[in-house]
Image (cartoon, grey):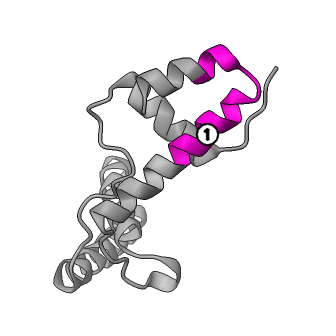
Amino acid sequence: MVVLHSPGGLSYIARLLVDPRIPVGTSGPVLDDQALAAYRKIYHEITHDVEEARRDNDHSRIIELEKQKEAFSAEIEKATGLGGRRREKSDPERVRKNVSHAVTRAIDAVASEHEWLEKHLRNSVI
């Protein structure tokens, strides 16, 4: 059994091996201030609607509203960092370099444990 400690690089490699066309290391567009404020407002409105549905014992509405609430929550979390501060868009070149370095470190870690796999990954991924 081999244990490797390179979670970022290994997850990038796994995604690349599944489908090399999948973008790796991208976070997608970050919400602007106006969109973020609108998402937060909608999230709070849905929260209020969930409370109302609970008071009315409307279980099907609660389920639907909770799904909507989770979707808005996920988008808000993607757009914000610690303390709710806005996350800035990443420089694509910096992201590319960071992913490339993480993949290389992961393959280097594999090399010390499994030479054949290391060669395969260098030929398949890099």
Q: Give the residues drawn in magenta, as a range.
A: 102-118
Q: Residue at x 37, y 49 (%)?
A: 63
- Residue 17 sits in which quadrant? top left
| Res 25 seen here | yes
- Give left or right: position of 5 versus 51: right
- Residue 31 sits in which quadrant? bottom left
x and y percentages locating residue 126 in the rendered image: 42, 33
Foreground residue among 42 and 51: 42
Numbered marks: total: 1
- Residue 75 sits in which quadrant? bottom left
Q: Residue at x 50, y 27 (%)?
A: 122
Foreground residue among 64 and 3: 3
What amino acid type should be assigned to the residue bearing mark 1? Ala
- Give left or right: position of 42 versus 54: left
Magenta span dominant secondary structure: helix
x and y percentages locating residue 97 in the rendered image: 41, 56
| Res 70 seen here | no
Does 44 lie within the magenta span?
A: no
